[in-house]
Amino acid sequence: MKNYLKIINIDEYSITPKYLQISNSILRGIEEQKIEKDDILPSINDLSIALEVSRATIERAYKELKKHDVIKSVAGKGYFISNTSFNQPVKVLLLFNKLSSHKKIIYDAFAETLGTNAAIDFYIYNNDFNVFKKLLSGNIEHYSKLIIIPHFIENPENALTIIDSLPKEKLILMDKLPEGLSGNFAAVYEDFERDIYFALEELLERLGKYHTIKIIFPDNSYHSKEILKGFLNFCGQYAFDYDIIHHVKNESLQPGTVYINLMEDDLVELIQKLILGNLKIGEDIGVISYNETPLKKIILNGITTISTDFKQMGKKAAEMVLTSSKEHAANPFRVTVRNSL
């Protein structure tokens, strides 16, 4: 029997579920001719012990391989490779800057749209340039597509140099489209300056009962500075007093002010100040929050949100993988009006 421990690779740093890492390793082994037709696979019990994972994980991995019509089982004998002449799934390296509820929506839509047509290796680099560089180092040749959300707090220029060096036929950028990249590659992105400008314009009638708009833009933020450009353009166009603040902690809330938050922590602190100051949301103070979440439908009878369509972003990126598109597509941006404004 083959030494499957040399073929099956489980990366503890990968966000990809272990059962998919196992099934993807076996598919890769077939592609590299390390595994051949009629080869017998280890039993579920033996492989779970050898890899130090649960039996359920091995069962899910083998079930995934059955979906690809790669393995079969014979009662009393176990599992064996039944087919090596199948359509190989597209191998995808997916790099997210961080994990959040919004990123989960993107991933779920991405994975669902691809279905069994792709094998996804999913990693989080936590806005860290060194981690990002390490994940790409030596991995490029193993993948057909490289999907990256390019948000960096430190060394953004070096990160863009690395991205620009990647094979453009493999590259798909999500969420952010940095300037200065060369070549013909695919992207589904937020048009940050345009999105906030037209979102605020859509809310203009409700904003009219306030005199000042403040945006909470944290120091050392990975958020695009283009958001501030769109915000300043709107305030100048429609003669609102405005301010850019970096945190809420020392802010004295004054009636007639609207606050726009980008980070969830700032929204929590803002709401606490509202409650402690006996200020009425939507009357004394207005609140607009970036990124739609189910909880914002409920908090204080509803928080107004401006948000890109995360599900559509994941779906569009997956379609670009399947069609090898080189399109640059601006992602839809939504305004959801609630009682906070």
Image (tube, grey):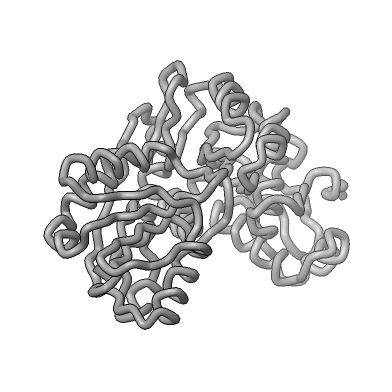
Residue 244 % position (x, y): 40, 48
Residue 227 is left or right of residue 204, and the answer is right
Q: Is 146 above or below relative to 271?
A: above
- Asked whether 181 or 71 is in front, the reply is 181
Residue 16 % position (x, y): 63, 54
Q: Residue at x 40, y 79 (%)?
A: 277
- Asked whether 242 or 39 is in front, the reply is 242
Residue at the top extreme, as displayed: 183
Q: Is 33 above or below relative to 64?
A: above
Q: Is residue 31 visible?
A: no
Q: Residue at x 58, y 42 (%)?
A: 95
Residue 85 is left or right of residue 305, and the answer is right
Residue 163 % position (x, y): 56, 26
User: Count of labels shown?
Assistant: 0
Q: Is residue 314 visible?
A: yes
Q: Residue at x 21, y 46 (%)?
A: 198
Q: Residue at x 42, y 44 (%)?
A: 318
Residue 338 % position (x, y): 24, 71
- Asked whether 241 or 170 is in front, the reply is 241
